[in-house]
Image (spheres, helix red, strand yellow):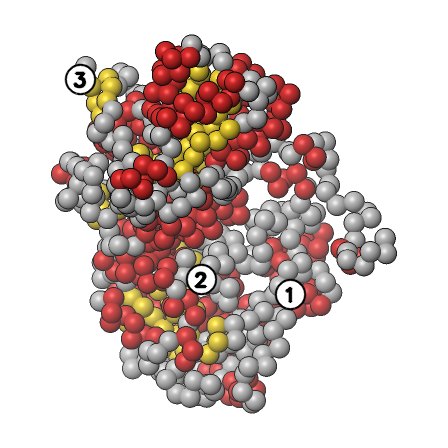
Amino acid sequence: MARSSPASRPANARQDSPRSSGGASLTREQKLELYYYMRLTRSLEERLVNLYRQTKVVGGLFRSLGQEADAVGSAYALDRSKGDVLSPLIRNLGSMLVQGAKPNEIIKQYMAKGDSPTRGRELNIHFGDLVRGFIGQISHLGDMVPVMAGVTLTFKMRSQDRVGLVYVGDGATSTGAFHEGINFAAVQRCPLVVVVENNAYAYSTPLNKQTAAKQLVDKAIGYGIAGEQADGNDVIATYEVTKRAVDRARAGGGVTLVELITYRRKGHAEHDNQSYVPPGEIDRWASENDPIDRYVKRLLNEGFDQSELAAIDARVKEEIDRATDEAEASPMPDPTDALVGIYADPPALTPLWFREGIKSAVEEHERPSSWGTNDG
Amino acid sequence: MAEVTYLEAIREALFEEMDRDKNVFCLGEDIGAYGGAFKVTEGLMAKYGEQRVIDTPISEAAIIGAAAGAAHMGMRPVCEMQFIDFISTGYDMLTNYVATARYRAMLPCPMVVRGPSGGYVRGGPFHSQNPEAAFLHTPGLKIVYPATASDAKGLLKSAIRDEDCVLYFEHKYLYRRIKEEMPSGDHLTPIGKARIAREGKDVSIITYAATVWKALEAAAQVEKEDGLSVEVVDLRTLLPMDDDAIIRTVKKTNRVLIVHEDTRTGGVAGEITARINENAFEWLDAPILRVTAADVPLPYSPPLEDYVLPQTSDIVLGLRKLAAY
C-alpha cells in the first residue's frame, strides 16, 4: 500500500476491492477486449522505443510500462455510446486507445508529422478529439481537473446523461489546480470521476516527499466526496472501481476520487536513468506484479485459450506495423502553417518582415553544434 | 431614452446576451445572490437562476478552467474576477491552457474574463491593478478595455460572441462617474478597432480606459491656453492592436504622446512605440513621449496614489513639450 515504506514500494502492494466481483459483469468478448487494449498499449510503446532509438521520435518518449491496466480498465468503465469524456495524463495512452485514438495518430504525434492530430504543434499523446470524447492535456499538472469540472458542469446544466473522467498522478495532487478543480466540481456535484494514479514517483520524487497524507484516497474526505482505492495493476479491479464511480456520477451522486495503486517501471521519460529507485524494486514489480502477466494468468485460469490471446497479439502487431508505415510516409508540416489558427479571427497571422516570402526558416549553413566555437 | 452608467451598460450587455443565447452563463465569487462586489451582476440570478449565474468558491483557477471546459462543449461562459487583481491566480490557466487551446488542440475556447480594474480609487496595491501588459504578451488571448459606457456595452456583447477568449477589463473609477444614452438596437462595438475620441491636427494622444478622460481634459486645456489642436485616440482593444488607427494619427499630427495608467516598464506604451518606429518612423517630427504610472506597486494614501498615477497636468506638460520640440 502507499503508506508502506515510501522509499521502496513492495511489488505485492495491492488493494483488492472488498466489493470486487472478479469481472462477473463483463462478457467474454469484453474481457478479450481489455487484453487487446493492454497489449496494444505496451506493444505500441515498444514500437515507439524503436523509433526513438532510430531518432525518428523528435521529442521525449513517455512510457506507461506496468501501468497499462489502470489506464485501460478505468477508461473501459466509461460509456462511449452516451458520449462520456475523459482527459488523459502522460501515462494514459491506454485510456486514449480505449476511447478511440489510433496507433497511427500516436506515432505521427511523436514523429511531429504535419498530418498528426495537432499538425505538429504538440508532442506525444497531448491531443484530443471532442467527437471521440477525449480532451488533450497540457503539461501543467492538475490543470485538467478544473477543465473537466467545466466539461461535466455542462453535462449537468444540459441535463445530459454523460460522465467525465480526469486522470492525475500522485504528484498532481499537490497542485493548486487539483484542489481548486476538485473542490469546485464537488460543490457543483458535477458528474466527474477523478482518477489518481499513484505510481510511487513524480519524476524522481517519491510519495512521502509529495504528501504527508497516509494515502491519497483520504483526500476525498476533505472535499466531501466519495473515495475508493483499488489495485491499479488488476485490470478487472480497476474497471470495477471506476465503473462504480461512473455509475454514481451518472446517477447524480457527484464526484468520486479513485486512487489506483500502481508502479512506474520506467523513468519519467526515456532519458531518465532512475538512479533514485532502490535496487531491486523495479525487478520485483516486473517479475511479481506485471499487469499483463497477471491478466493473462487470470484469463487462462478462466478457461480462455492461449490461441485466442496469440491471435490478438498478432492483430496488434499487424496494426502497429501498418500504423508505423503510414506515419513514416507522412509529410512534415509546412513551416508557414505555424501562423495559422491562433485565433478564429483573424484566421492566420501575417509573416514577420524577415519571413516574407520565405517558406523554410533554417538555412543549410545553420548548425547549432558549431555555436560558441568561434572557428567559423 | 434614459442615460446609462458605464456599470449599468455592462449589466445591460449581460442581460441582453443571456436573453439572446441560452449558452451564455456567468460564474464568479459573490455574483449571484449578492449581485457582485460592485453590483454589476445584480438581478441576474433572480432572472436566470443559479444554474446560469453560479456563485463559486474562491478559486480563480477553477473559475477560468471550468469556463474553458464549458466553452469547449459549446457554452459561452462569462467569468467575473471580483477584482481584476486576482486574475493573477488564474494566470496559468489563461496563458497555458486557454490561450493555447485552439492552436495546439483545435479546441475552441469562446469565453470572457471580466473584472473591475484600475486605480484613482484609493484601493491600494491589490484593488487597483491594470493587468493588461501581463497578458498582452500571450498569443491566443484578446484584450479590450472600454472607456465609455456605450463601448462598455458594445465591447462586452462582442466579447461574448467572439470565438476566442477575451479579457474584458472594466475601469471601476468609471463605473458610476460617466453615463450616456445607449445606441439603440443590438449594439456591438467591433473588437480590434480604435476610436477617435477627439479630432486634432497638432499632437496625438494614444491612450485607453480611464486616461482617455484625462487626455480629453488636457486636450481641452491646451486648446484654450495654447491654441493646440490635439487628437485623442482611444484604442478600446489592446490585443489585437489597431495598427492602422495608430499609423493614421501619426501621419496626421507627426507628434505622439502615449498615456496609460499602468506602470511604465514593459507596458503597452513601449509596444505602441515599437510599432510606430517600425511602420512610420519617417513621419515623426519629435520623439515619442510616454506619460504612465511610475514603476511602483500602487500605494493607498491619496498623496501617494496621486503622485504615482498619471494626472491631467502631466499630460498637459507632455503635449506642450511635444508641440515645442
Q: Quadrant of the N terminus of chain B?
A: top left
Q: For the point 70% across and 31% down, which residue is it?
A: A356
Q: For the point 48% across and 56% down, which residue is it?
A: A138
Residue at the spot of label 1: A48
Q: Nearer the viewer, residue A73 or A319?
A: A73
Q: Nearer the viewer, residue B240 or A289?
A: B240
Quadrant position of residue B41: top left
Residue at the spot of label 3: B2
Cα separation between marks 3 and 2: 51 Å
| Chain on which label 2 sits | A
CB-based contact (under 8 Å), mark 3 and mark 2: no
Q: Nearer the viewer, mark 1 or mark 2?
A: 2
Sooner in the amino-acid sequence: mark 1 or mark 2: 1
Q: Position of residue A261 (x, y in %)?
A: 41, 78
For badge 2, the amino acid type reads Leu
Q: SS of the residue at dot 3?
A: loop
For badge 1, the amino acid type reads Leu
Q: For the point 61% across and 31% down, which residue is it?
A: A350
**Crowding at label 1, few (<14), some or many (≥20) Cα neighbours within 10 Å?**
many
**Crowding at label 3, few (<14), some or many (≥20) Cα neighbours within 10 Å?**
few
Residue at the spot of label 2: A141
